[in-house]
Amino acid sequence: MTSKPAKPSFRERVVAEILGHIEAGTAAWLKPWKPDVHRLAPHNPVTNATYRGINALWLEMQGHADPRWMTYRQAQGVDAQVRKGERGTPVEYWQWTETKPVLDEAGQPVRDAAGTPRRQTFSLERPRVFHATVFNASQIDGLEPFTAPAITDPAFAPIPRAEAVLAQGGVPIVHDQGDRAFYRPATDRIHLPDKSRFLGAEEYYATALHELGHASGSRTRLNRDLSGGFGSARYAEEELRAELA
């Protein structure tokens, strides 16, 4: 009987993802907006802890504009809820030390002058590793929207004809992104950076209309299959349709 291949470890997944980007060798995509120069590091708003090292790198690679991450239970603890179907992202924690009570020769706790049991911290010969699954705030309902620090830019000059096309499309546009633009089929909404972040009105409308092209494939419209993953033939076909639209 053929045994199943071993599931890659957390670190193997991170390394494979990084190598994949390197081996792809694609030129950097010139985004039609200014990156979020005030981008915050991934952090947990429940514990107020900032993710570091490989966890920070891995969470940044997920491409979410919102820097907030938390576990499923932590979301429930603040009266929020992870949306059905959302997939979490693993993170890794290491325990290098352990704290135990100090005992006397009889095995009884040693107490200080105030009567409090004394405790001692020591290094572990074999550090322990733990894994947890966290979700980005953009995957969770019930949280306050993340507000990025404002960036001062020249006034945006709307293009009436483009605005009319977007209005006729009937798809809500939410300006809640710092460095991404996408259409989300589950909520039938287009998510974009704020208009002030774009290099100009033409770049903004080109991006918005591209995402409107994707929105035409929703179940309530042309009912196209929008499930193609990045790099697949189906994904490429859908991107071509959006560009032609």
Image (spheres, grey):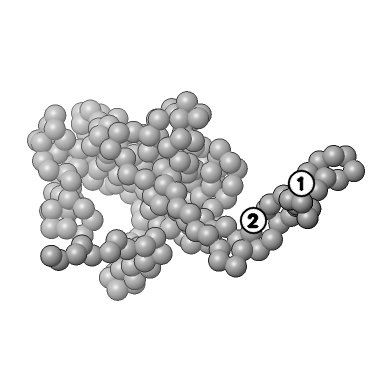
In the shown orientation, is residue 93 left or right of residue 209?
right
Residue neighbourhood size for the residue with mark 2, other residues' Cα within 10 Å, grouped as few (<14), some (14–19), many (≥20): few
Q: Residue furthest right?
A: 113
Query: In the rendered image of this protein, does residue 162 appear above or below residue 142?
Result: below
Query: In the rendered image of this protein, does residue 3 appear above or below residue 228?
Result: below
Residue at the (78%, 44%) spot, across then down: 117
Q: Residue furthest front?
A: 106
CB under 8 Å between callouts 2 and 1? no
Query: Camera-side residue: 124 or 85?
Result: 124
In the rendered structure, find residue 109 and report the number of the disc placed on it. Answer: 1
Q: Secondary structure at mark 2?
A: strand
The percent position of residue 164, horizontal first and vertical second, equals: 24, 31
Residue at the (32%, 63%) spot, across then down: 8
- Answer with mark 2 or mark 1, whichever residue precedes in sequence: 2
Residue at the (46%, 35%) spot, across then down: 73
In the rendered structure, find residue 101 and report the number of the disc placed on it. Answer: none
Measure the alpha-carbon separation of dots 2 and 1.
17 Å
The amino acid type of the residue labelled 1 equals: Pro
The residue that disc 2 covers is: 98
The percent position of residue 116, horizontal first and vertical second, equals: 81, 41
The percent position of residue 89, horizontal first and vertical second, equals: 39, 49
Q: Secondary structure at mark 1?
A: loop
Query: Camera-side residue: 187 or 131?
Result: 131
Q: Residue 71's image quarter?
A: top left
The amino acid type of the residue labelled 2 equals: Glu
